[in-house]
């Protein structure tokens, strides 16, 4: 039995295509289902995942031909990828850019974001997040619910900030890093590229690239494999 497609569309909705059919895509679609600012025209995925014609009630299309179905000059894209592997999530984003898509930003109506914040594209800011004045974001970042990011902080590219994090003002977070649930970063810290900060950690010092930190206060607990990058369980 074919699934029923979503049909309720606001006249002012932005037409977008979702790239990815992982659990992260399901989370995003749940958010978008009640947000009239966006119209999900379809979902796309790589050939190896294309087994059915629908995903979560939306039509599903193979990625290799997506630009012929939804031309980049008419549709924007939201790229999901696999949240548990920043390098893979970045690879998804780069494949969309190679097809000349401009990516939208999803900023929940229930997020509190200063109008002075600067965003790149393909950023996901969920409800309950508070982003203070003059912060800057690159591309392809995720900020989950109830996280605070202090004034003038800089978030690079493909960074994952889990729920309930507290990041003090003027912190810098490098590309491909992951900040675990409930972690706290105190004052003007510089977190290097591909750093993993564990859940509940209290960061009081800068973190060099390819490092792991755990504990209260957080201590360096290991290294990230430079060949694989960060890879969390549940990929």
Image (cartoon, helix red, strand yellow):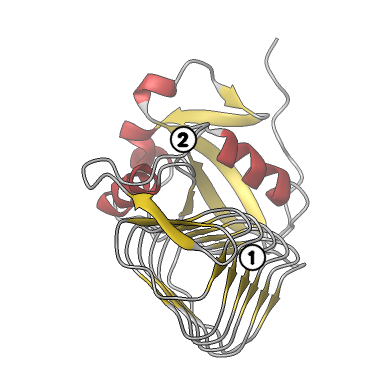
Q: What is the x, y in percent for residue 168?
A: 58, 81
- Residue positioned 31% across, 54% down in the render: 97
- Residue positioned 63% across, 37% down in the render: 26
Q: Is residue 75 above or below residue 173?
A: above
Q: CA distance from mark 2 to mark 1?
A: 31 Å
Q: What is the x, y in percent for residue 221?
A: 41, 53
Count of marks, rendered view: 2
Q: Which residue is mark 2?
A: 44
Helix, strand or loop under label 2: strand
The 10 Å Cα crowd at callout 2, few under 14, some 14 to 19, many 20 or more, is many
Closer-to-camera residue (1/133): 133
Point out which mark residue 151 bears: none
Query: Picture quarter containing residue 37?
Result: bottom right
Q: What is the x, y in percent for residue 149?
A: 60, 76
Which of pointers 2 and 1 lies earlier in the amino acid sequence?
Answer: 2
Helix, strand or loop under label 1: loop
Q: Is residue 49 above or below residue 75?
A: above
Closer-to-camera residue (118/216): 216
């Amino acid at each position: 039995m074919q699934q029923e497609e979503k049909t309720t569309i606001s006249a002012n909705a932005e037409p977008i295509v979702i790239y990815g059919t992982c659990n992260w895509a399901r989370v995003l679609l749940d958010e978008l289902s009640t947000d009239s600012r966006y119209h999900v025209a379809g979902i796309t995925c790589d050939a190896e995942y294309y087994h059915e014609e629908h995903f979560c009630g939306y039509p599903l299309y193979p990625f290799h031909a997506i630009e012929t179905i939804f031309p980049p000059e008419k549709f924007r894209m939201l790229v999901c990828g696999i949240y548990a592997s920043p390098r893979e999530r970045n690879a998804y984003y780069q494949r969309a850019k190679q097809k000349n898509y401009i990516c939208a930003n999803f900023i929940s109506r229930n997020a509190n974001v200063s109008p002075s914040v600067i965003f790149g594209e393909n950023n996901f800011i969920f409800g309950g997040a508070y982003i203070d004045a003059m912060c800057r974001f690159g591309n392809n970042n995720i900020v989950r619910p109830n996280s605070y990011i202090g004034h003038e902080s800089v978030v690079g590219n493909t960074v994952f900030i889990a729920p309930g994090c507290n990041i003090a003002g003027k912190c810098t977070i490098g590309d491909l890093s992951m900040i675990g649930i409930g972690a706290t970063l105190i004052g003007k810290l510089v977190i290097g590229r591909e750093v993993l900060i564990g859940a509940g950690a209290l960061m009081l010092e800068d973190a060099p690239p390819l490092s792991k930190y755990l504990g209260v206060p957080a201590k360096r607990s290991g290294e990230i494999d430079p060949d694989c990058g960060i890879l969390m369980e549940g990929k």
